[in-house]
Image (cartoon, rainbow, N blue to C red):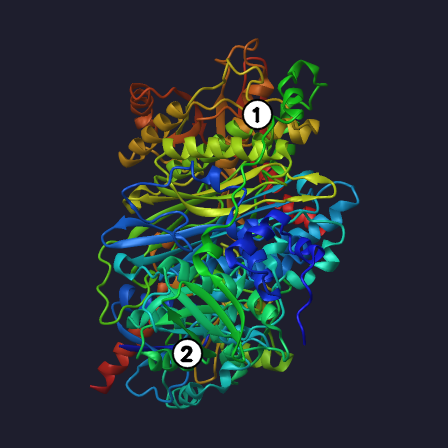
Amino acid sequence: MNFAVLQFPASNCDQDALHVVRNVLGQAGRFVWHKESSLAGFDAVIIPGGFSYGDYLRTGAIARFSPIMEAVRRFAADGGPVLGICNGFQILCEARLLPGALIRNRSLQFRCEHVFVKTTSGDTPFTGKIPAGKIMRVPIAHGEGCYFADDETLQSLQDKGQILWQYCTAQGELTEEANPNGSLRHIAGICNPERNVAGLMPHPERASEAILGSDDGRLIFESLVTWFEARVAKAA
Amino acid sequence: MSDPQITPELVEKHNLTAEEYDRIKNILGREPSYTELGIFSVMWSEHCSYKNTRPLLKTLPTKSPRILVGAGEENAGIVDIGDGLAIAFKIESHNHPSAVEPFQGAATGVGGIIRDIFTMGARPVCAIDSLRFGPITGDAGAVANNRRLFSGVVSGIAHYGNCFGIPTVAGEIYFDKCYEGNPLVNVFCLGVLRREQIARGAAKGIGNPVFYVGPATGRDGLAGAAFASRDLTEESSDRQRGAVQVGDPFMEKLVCEACLELLATGAVAGIQDMGAAGLTCSTCETAARAGTGIEIELALVPQRVPNMTPYEIMLSESQERMLIIVQAGREEEVKRIFDKWDLPSAQIGRVTDTGRMIVKYHGAVVADVPAKKLADEAPIYQREAREPAYFQTVRSFSLTSLPPAPEPGEALRRLLAWPAIASKNWVYRQYDHMVRDGSVGCPGSDAAVIRLKDDSLPMTKGEAVPVTTEKFLALTVDCNAAYVYLNPYEGARIAVAEAARNLACTGAVPLGATDNLNFANPHNPELFWQLRESVRGLGEACLAFDAPITGGNCSLYNQSPAGPIDPTPTIALVGLIDKPEYITTQWFKEEGDVIILLGEVLDDQDPWRGLGGSAWLQSLHGLKTGQPPRLDLEAERRLHTTLRGLIYSGLIRSAHDCSEGGLAVTLAESCISQQIARDTPRLIGAEIDLSFASAETAWVDALLFGECQSRVVVSVASTNAVKVVERAKIMGVPARRIGLVGGNELRLKSASSEYKWPLVELHDLWWNALARAMSD
């Protein structure tokens, strides 16, 4: 499986994502510079974390105008899986590939800590391998991770099973204390109605090896690989 | 526009003495121009020239077979870590700017030290920091301002480091009245490279073009180096704001990536960042190092505002700029790479064989100075030193004069909530401490541990040779300045010993050290004595732990109208951990494990019983007096070697050093400091029996809160307890079984009484103390 890891100016989790793709999953992958305009030959796209363009205007607001985003749009329209992590999630929202917006944490401070996250739907390329009821321990690191959308959008997300990940306690309860940024409905990550574009604020690439304290995040990447292998097998 | 007339007043305004001015005239053989006066004033400031400290710094140990680039040679020292790999690291202060504008002052401090590291050709992979502020609790009027400075500095570090994408993995913070109005902000950065990738800040190759890369030059940060070399005054905050730079971490990230990409092409002959003293320092130092000359045309320098004078362009400290000397004929490669990153670059001059730094503006010479004399021949001063009057007073302090203290049960609660001891999670949760996928040991244990892997290295020209063995580094920064104030020599030795002990507790062997000497005005003989004695202590201890100084920074003139700061020689140590299974953390692991104290229970020879200068004396009695605990470097070394040996044998489950707050605080932290996730600590109790220490010799306050040196609390599987005690004793390290892990309380028995503390309560006091203070 061949992964594209997009590089915007001041992406800073790009190397981490590629490290997991190549060295942990043993898959192929390379960086794709934001000025490129094609994603031909890739099987999945990761938009990594960072501070694209310094995030001085609004997180992800400038990155969405990069030439590569047109290619991402086409790649997604053709059913290719796109995963946005942290700043990548913010860019996907700005590009309207995902609904809603990520606004300043309710604490008004940057937060870097491990959180617990539960997966609410196994029916996506990103969640197929995550055991039902599994509570994942993954880190967050963001200043603007509070998921926000109008009631109608939130209801629609819920009804269509597009809320993929929610902040919770170690026991899986959705409590105020377990929500690190004030996200509505405890949303940590969502997908589009077609279920091939997903974004999440936590960093699964920082929790993919036991030596870093947790390898729960690897389940998300392994889901992608399994999904892809099944698709190839089906085509053959 | 004409330059001002040079008068004695103008010379004085440039912080130069009449003698120094005469020396300048001697070097030039004439009166300097206004631009030249500015150039000399910044290059001969303490910040750039070390004119007051150089004789002392020469006494520090700086050699070891591992050192590839030594102290003072380049922007940062470089240490060999084996398998063809090396690390570059350094600590630097940004105290004065942070006092005036905490957010930008701290942010640009981080930016500056990151540039020092990638200038060496290394990829920056982690940062740590050491901070000091005035008290943030209590009713005093200054508390609000201290909190403002504290939160501003933390936000500034977070802003710059998080955006750049460097994990801030460790640090230390103290709060004391002496830092009111003069906070300390010391930031450290570490980078990794292959041995053959070391870049030099030398203008080599006659005729080679000199490039300016990075954002345009503005009027910000004019003469910041000179500002840093003066006392802070009441007017500083208004008058000096223009000397504080504004940082842009986004720009820094691009400049870093572009420079590493350019270095990989082999087109670079020399490279230096424009830090303190900006274009001035980078041009004359690169020429001085190569023994060449340099000629630049200021009209070619990208400028942010119109009508800047040559003086302003030369002295500006605008951030994120680099000077690059390129191999002649390869100019196009520079342009190609910097265009890719949308960064400005301009050829502003060339390397000459004249030995002179010649600065032109629209063709007219505005400065013509011998580069080597400017860079290397600043005046050197042997300052007068005299033992301070207070030294006798603190030495004569006796514990018997103390009023009754709160009983130990309450004392431990208050110590755990004392800001210097309390958990610093309010700070480090604002720093991205996990980016780069290498943070194996996050903030909150004795030392941070990072993993180096392929992408920790800068790119190479061809296909990179993969790194076959992962490497693990441990990092810590320490300095208990109260000890240093009470006895600069002993205090400085203890700072190094504690840092080395922290490394040993994680399973690491020291590789090298970098020091940040934060002191007050060196013209005051009593304050200079503090500096001289501290450096003597630092040198002795660094030698003992095989941790040579690879570079560092001096920050003098740290005093506000309220008085001088306590002498604060912060010391950062970097160590190597050979195997991942050796990495050890401070918290207790399993119920039923045996708790062992390595080191003496009490120092009978110490008249203050380890309570001199202690956190107990400071926080519960409001006293900073007595003498710091005694340190036997030989015993300390034995402890570290023994502990590492036990760790290598797989016998140690947890190890935590005893420092501020003594044995009781160490034990409490071992019970409460493991954090699984947000709002989810793992609490694990302990039952401790210290009744063997007889009540008359072991006064219970000293037993629990005394800060005797050379001690570590370890926990081991019960089946290994006898073996561990025996092995330690054979190695000459006192060892004693003091309790068992288990339960949900910390219970402690002394010869005279028993105490128990519910862990939930202790954790709350310790974990939330800073957040509570800051939300008051």
**Viewer-proximal residue among B412 and A178:** B412
**Viewer-proximal residue among B171 and A230:** B171
B200 is higher (above) or lower (below) than B660: below
Residue B589 in the figure: left or right of residue A187: left
Residue most extreme to the front: B29
Q: Name the residue under label 2.
A: B338
**Viewer-proximal residue among B610 and B391:** B391
**Which type of secondary structure does the marked residue at label 1 adopt?**
helix
Residue B166 can be seen in this image: no
Disc 1 and disc 2: Cα gap in Å?
Answer: 57 Å
- Residue B632, percent across and down? 43, 22
Location of the C terminus of chain A by quadrant is bottom left
Q: Residue B413 carries which label?
A: none
Instruction: Classify 10 Å Cα crowding around label 2: few (below 14), some (14-19), many (20 and above).
Output: many
Which of the 4 quarters of the picture holds residue A82?
A: bottom left
Q: Name the residue under label 1.
A: B705
- Residue B690, percent across and down? 50, 18
Q: What residue type is labelled 2?
A: Phe
Instruction: Classify 10 Å Cα crowding around label 1: few (below 14), some (14-19), many (20 and above).
Output: many
Residue B721 can be seen in this image: yes
Residues at marks 1 and 2, common chain? yes
B438 is higher (above) or lower (below) than B764: below
Q: Earlier in the sequence, mark 1 or mark 2?
A: 2
